[in-house]
Image: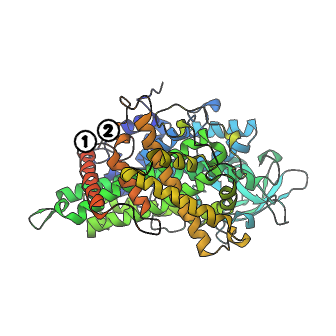
Amino acid sequence: MITVTETPADLLDAALGDPWDAANPVGFAGILAADERQEMFAEGERRLDAFGLNAEFVPVRHGGRLGRADRLAAALRTLWRRDPCLGLGYGFSSFIASVNLWSAGDEQQRRTAAGMLLDNRKIASVYHELAHGNDFAHAEFAARPAPGGGWLLNGTKEIVTNFRRADALVVFARTDGAPGSRSHSQFFVRKDGLPEGALRYLDRFPSSGMRGVQLGGGRFTDCPVPDGALLGEPGRGIETALKSFQLTRSIIPSMCVGPLDTALRTAVGFALERRLYGGAAADLPYVRTVLGRAFADLLAVDAFTTVVVRALQVLPEETPVLASASKYLASRMLLDTLEELRGVLGAQSYLREGPYAVFQKMARDVAPATFGHASRSACLVTVLPQLPRLARRAWFASAPAPAALFDLDADLPELDFGLLAAGSPHTDGLAATLVETAERLGGRGPAGRLAARFRDELAALREECRALAPQDITIGASPHAYAAAGRYTVVLAAAAVLGVWWHAQHAEHAQHGPRPGLRDEAALLAALDRLDRRLPGRSVLTAAERADLDRQLFDRAVERFADRRLFDLTARHIPG
């Protein structure tokens, strides 16, 4: 049985061992060698087979271990901290596909999918067409009724993870030539029954990141599938995808904190070891500042993404907006932070061999993960049409989010895929938490000033978004409208940071809880300051206050490094 101290993340860390140990067969040495060969890391896959990672993607009711989205995200983060290629190519691609089955499949389809995954087989999500990218409503790949029953699939799909080696596919296809949201459906296709010639594979697409992942394509020609392959009712493909995206868009940025942890760990180790000007590189003020701020960025991203993942089970009605906001902002912050860390390592950040070579792999692999599946612009397009409605009905009117959203150690009900909806939320509990916390702090001290800053930004957004023109909530929106959506994501992130900190300060277990680091005011202020600097206008903290925070966060980062603890909110001990 998995106990509170033995989460899937803990068990997976133990199974994979210290990645920095050269003698570890599934350590960074083997991972980097496989990357140079542009292959999936075979020994890593064998170890994950033995661990049964696919069980994390299968709901408990179907024989798996998926009951809490936050524990799934933490387990995937553990894997992505070591090798994003394994994280995507072994696991997450199957999860992306299977979510559609848990959301819309019938009992037989779910049993079949669960059996495949629990048998260490793979399912591929076959969505993308290069001509249309994230614009699924215009996808041309077609499914037409076949004479005598069933369907015929025709068309080409590209940039699909594990297309060739998956045992089954979830295929997104046009089933109606008319425009509109009811024009597409999804099909669960087993490859073992396809006639010869019905599916021909395309060559792998070259890529600078995720080089070990099979990013292929395929061409279907009158490919027959039975009536039982259809997921749900005809014409519900986009609706099913929008529900599923809430899970995948929430979890992707959360698990990408793992590669950032490794990149920061590599940079801290380099700074402490590298000798410059008669001392260590870490003695230089610039280096210390970059490392401290990168740590603050990681904490801000972790707070935001963890709260959004928990919202899947605490506030599922609000996740259509939260998931896209998290995917947009967290992806942007991750890439920016990696680029700043590159300045610490200099030329070492590009080398593909030596003690710091894992940095370049993490930086290359994270880049496609931040725009793959759904680009940042696509996420903002999802948020845009919600802004006028939220401005008029929700901001400064909704009730604050439940405490369970911010109590990161509290248990959660079993994940219910039926609660995920493709509609528009009418409340904004996270923004309401920001308003409540700002009122409680009353502008006192740096925390109060920062909270007031984000509350005032929300008030300004309320006025601007109420006045948005109809064309400004579409893909053709003005740069000003897109900027407003981006600012809103920053406000939500600040609300998450404040909510986690406030709860840790005032919850009954705060004095003896397992995560004292959550009550660290310096970390709170540094994370909020990093978010504040993403907004227009004058920053809240003074130069002296910021310099003091930079020093404190650098010292804390070095302490975590020396103590072999994660840099995220868990601060848990790890092997290596």
Say which amino acid is labelled 1.
Answer: Asp
Badge 2: how crowded within 10 Å, few (<14), some, or many (20+)? some
Say whether residue 221 is left or right of residue 312. Answer: right
Q: Quadrant of residue 135?
A: bottom right
Q: Residue at x 29, y 44 (%)?
A: 576
Residue 563 disc label = 1
Q: Disc 2 designates what residue? A: 573
**First of labels 2, 1 by sequence position:** 1
Name above or below for residue 406 compared with residue 150: above
In what element is the residue under mark 1? loop
**Residue 163 picture location, percent across and down:** 61, 56
Name above or below for residue 188 compared with residue 198: above
Q: Nearer the viewer, residue 29 or 394?
A: 394
Say whether residue 12 is left or right of residue 222. Answer: left
Marks 2 and 1, how far apart at CA: 8 Å
Q: Mark 2 and mark 1 in contact? Answer it, CB < 8 Å.
A: yes
Count of numbered badges drawn on the protein = 2
Say whether residue 315 is left or right of residue 33. Answer: right
| Outermost residue toward the left in this view | 278
Q: Residue at x 60, y 39 (%)?
A: 313
Q: How is the image coloured?
A: rainbow
Say which amino acid is labelled 2.
Answer: His
Say whether residue 537 is left or right of residue 391. Answer: left
Residue 199 disc label = none
**Residue 14 picture location, percent across and down:** 36, 36
Q: Residue at x 74, y 36 (%)?
A: 108
**Residue 219 picture location, percent across and down:** 69, 64
In what element is the residue under mark 2? loop
**Residue 340 picture location, percent across and down:** 34, 66
Q: Nearer the viewer, residue 427 or 332?
A: 427
